[in-house]
Amino acid sequence: MSRRPLSLTIAAAVAVIFGLLTIVSGGRALFGGVDMGAVVPFVLWFNFGAGFAYVLAGIGLWRGGAWAPMLALGIAVATALVFVAFLWHVLTGGAWEARTMGAMILRTCIWTAIAALALRGKKPT
């Protein structure tokens, strides 16, 4: 049995924890009646749904699933695309919150790093 690199172990743990926090916070904003200010609905719904993918990717990375690096890459790309759409929304005068900008920067950076670590640690087939 080969050992998982420490960086991939940390990435997997971050993915699961980040995913659970994303599900809870997104669920509260969507279903809990919490006033979140000028939310951007497509960003909020994407992030809530992506939280489940974060947990799945983290478990896959932890268990060494051959599919997990590609899921991490897909999350990174999808997050970057939603970030671009959010930036377009901002630039065209749509209402938004500064915390959404910060969150999208953080999510894009985290998932780019996780995907890079996962792909680097991927065994050749």
Image (cartoon, rainbow, N blue to C red):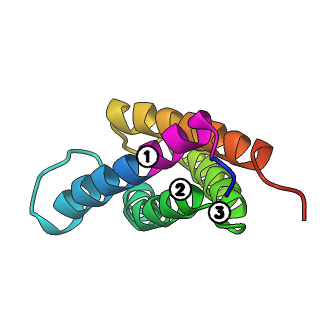
Figure quadrant of the N terminus:
bottom right
Residue 92 in view (yes/no)? no
Q: Are marks 2 and 1 in contact (CB under 8 Å)?
A: yes
- For the record, the magenta segment spans 4-15
Residue in the picture at 75% in, 45% down: 121
Q: Give the structural element (helix, strand or loop) at label 1.
A: helix
- The residue lying toward the viewer, choosing from 58 and 88, is 58
- Of all residues, the one furthest to the right in this rendering is 125
User: Considering only vertical position in the picture, is 29 above or below 9?
Assistant: below
User: Considering only vertical position in the picture, is 116 above or below 16?
Assistant: above
- The residue lying toward the viewer, choosing from 74 and 13, is 13
Q: Position of residue 53 (x, y in %)?
A: 49, 65
Residue in the picture at 63% in, 61% down: 64
User: Label 2 neighbourhood size at 10 Å, few (<14), some (14-19), many (20+)?
Assistant: some
Q: Amino acid at mark 2?
A: Trp
- Of all residues, the one furthest to the front in this rendering is 1
Query: Disc number at residue 104?
Result: none
